[in-house]
Image: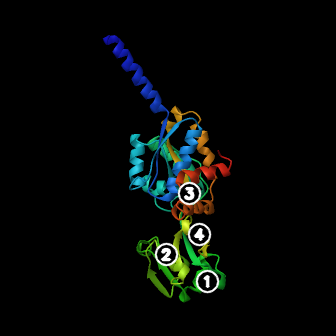
Amino acid sequence: MRRALIILSCILMLASCAQDDQVVRIATKPMSEQYILGEMLALLVEDAGYQAEVTKGVGGGTSNIQPAMERGDFDLYPEYTSSGWILVLGHEAGDGDEDDMLAQLDKEYQERFGMRWLGLYGFNNTYTVAVRGEVARRYGLEKTSDLAAVAPSLTFGGNPDYLERADGFPALCEVYGLDFGDVRDIDIGLKYTALASGDIDVTNAYTTDAQLANPDIDVVTLDDDLGLQVDYYCSTVVRSDTLERCPGLEEALMRMDGLISEADMARMNYLVEVEGQDERQVALDYLTAKGVL
């Protein structure tokens, strides 16, 4: 009887281990964009024949997800190139060739952490300058350098963090020679409302902000023609041992490569943040429309 119990216990343990091998654990940072991307990755994992377990909104983002990845608490997560380059590898912003960054990230992550960077989704979530549409058309503003001639007539409104950080507003003004007529502190959640009402003319934004896809807000983003901003292209960071134990997973995840534009990501963020749609449904609809699923 005792022997039978031992055999049964061993069978159950083996079954549990086999089941665990089929689970791929995904982490995301605490923002709508990451929730959507996490669901996309989960759908691709499931399409490859594995179970996906998503942990949404890990506090601290990279600073807490990366150590958890190293411990094996998570198998993969969506990450941004400059976040990995600066926060994880300890390089300086702008140090290295932006065009070769993915290859260098992949190389160093393999050597130091036993992890891979798989492809680039296509969009670059970095700082941009947003201008009220009427103002952009009046002055013919297309590039950030176009602002220099008219900045004294305009009001810039930015959230306090951006106005104060050295690589934010001070760098923008220095690199582009901008001297705005007025500068105002604006809560990050009210910037687009202030633009729409005419209280401000220009603000700092991210290229995938949900409000950039809002049809009720007339706003134009300017090209960073002097290359001030570093790139934050999104990609999948995944443990190498996860790829080894999950045949076909790498091919499934690489279907995200080049899939999403800034405008598409902003639109999906808008659907979730403003219209209140479910992240998984938005992710499913997009992958289906693109023919990925």
Q: Earlier in the sequence, mark 3 or mark 4?
A: 4
* Disc 2 + disc 1, Cβ < 8 Å: no
> Disc 4 vs disc 1: which is toward the camera?
4
Quarter of the picture holding the N terminus: top left
In the figure, is residue 14 to the left or right of 236? left
Q: Amino acid at mark 2?
A: Lys
Q: Residue at x 49, y 44 (%)?
A: 76
Frontmost residue, 71 versus 195: 195
Q: Nearer the viewer, mark 2 or mark 3?
A: 2
* Residue 83, disc: none
Q: What residue is drawn where x is 57% and y is 33%?
A: 247
- The residue carrying mark 3 is 233
Residue at 38%, 17% in the rendered image = 8
Residue ID for mark 2? 191
**Residue 147: where, in percent of width, then height?**
59, 81
**Marks 2/1: CA distance?**
16 Å
**Mark 3 or mark 1, which is nearer the start of the sequence?**
1
Instruction: Locate residue 166 relative to residue 153 in the image: left or right.
Output: left
Relative horizontal placement of residue 98, taking residue 292 as reference (left or right):
left
Three-letter code, disc 3: Tyr
Residue annotated with mark 1: 135
* Category of crowding for the residue at label 1, using alpha-carbon neighbours closer than 10 angstroms: few (below 14), some (14–19), many (at least 20): some
Q: Which residue is mark 4?
A: 214
* x then y, percent, for residue 261: 63, 59
The disc, 4 or 1, on the residue closer to the chain's N-terminal end is 1
Mark 2 vs mark 4: give the one in front: 4
Query: Do tag 4 and tag 1 residues touch (Cβ < 8 Å)?
Result: no
- Which quadrant would residue 268 be assigned to in this image? bottom right
- Within-10-Å neighbours for mark 4: few <14, some 14–19, many 20+: some
